[in-house]
Amino acid sequence: MTLIIYFKMLFKYLLEAKSKHGLYSRTHKLNNLLEELIEYTPFKTDKTKYRMALQVITVCAEEYRYNFLIDCEGYRDSVQIANELLKELLAFNGD
């Protein structure tokens, strides 16, 4: 659950700080926030590389007990993939 909250906070911060509009939609879907970040800021990445990982993390966080127990290995793989996105986002923030 902590990872999803961290992603939301980071996406929203970057959209407020680095976009010319200074705002973000009220959606809580990580994929949508990433797409907004790519559209409204100079941040560029291959979003298809991260789409499934963000979706798995979101679903596992929202329905933690059920999904995590069924596919905890998939969750771990998604977290590893999402770590790469975090590195990109932190580097972008350090500009």
Image (spheres, rainbow, N blue to C red):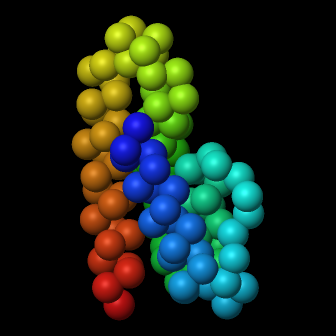
Location of residue 50 with respect to 45 vertically, above or below: above
Residue 52 visible in the picture:
no
**Which is more toward the observer, 36 or 12?**
12
Describe residue 67's horizontal placement relative to residue 33 as left or right.
left
Q: Quadrant of the C terminus?
A: bottom left
Q: Position of residue 75 (x, y in %)?
A: 34, 28
- The residue depicted at 51 percent of the width and 76 percent of the height is 14
Describe residue 20's horizontal placement relative to residue 91 as left or right.
right
Number of marks in the rendered image: 0
- The residue depicted at 46 percent of the width and 11 percent of the height is 66
Q: Quadrant of the N terminus?
A: top left
Location of residue 19 with respect to 83 vertically, above or below: below
Q: Quadrant of residue 12?
A: bottom right
- The residue depicted at 54 percent of the width and 85 percent of the height is 17
Location of residue 33 with respect to 14 vertically, above or below: above
Q: Position of residue 90 (x, y in %)?
A: 32, 72
Describe residue 3's horizontal placement relative to residue 13 as left or right.
left
- The residue depicted at 31 percent of the width and 19 percent of the height is 72
**Which is more toward the observer, 58 or 92?**
58
Residue 94 visible in the picture:
yes
Q: Position of residue 84 (x, y in %)?
A: 29, 56
Q: Position of residue 62 (x, y in %)?
A: 54, 29
